[in-house]
Amino acid sequence: MQPEEHSEDLLPLLLEICEDYFAHTGPAGHREVDALLRARDITGGPGWLIDMLALTRRRLQGGTQTHAH
């Protein structure tokens, strides 16, 4: 099995894992993510990242709808 063969299958799973992790992490984790995003001039906060992970995953799976966390 070549990694390229299943990368399309793995990417939505990896995005979902990250989405779940960030959605359920505590306040300290949210502060760290917020600081990381702000260092890149992104001011949407952890909620923005969670939404973008979900949107990207759903687009890869053939849908475009997203729900806010």
Image (spheres, grey):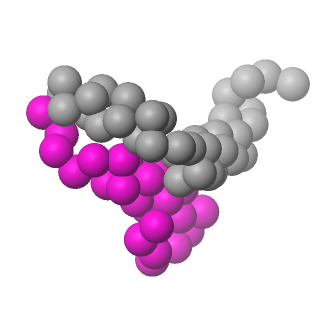
Disc count in the image?
Answer: 0
Location of residue 61 (image quadrant): bottom right
Left or right: residue 52 compared with residue 44: right
Location of residue 40 (image quadrant): top left
Q: Is residue 58 above or below residue 56?
A: below
* Residue 29 picture location, percent across and down: 47, 35
Q: Is residue 68 magenta?
A: yes
Left or right: residue 24 compared with residue 36: right
* Residue 45 picture location, percent across and down: 28, 47
Q: Is residue 62 above or below residue 3?
A: below
- Judged from this view, the residue extending furthest toward the front is 27
Q: Is residue 64 above or below residue 3?
A: below
Instruction: Please provide the residue range marked out in magenta.
Output: 41-69
Which of 25/36 is in front? Answer: 25
Location of residue 4 (image quadrant): top right
Residue 3 seen in the figure = yes
Q: Is residue 55 magenta?
A: yes
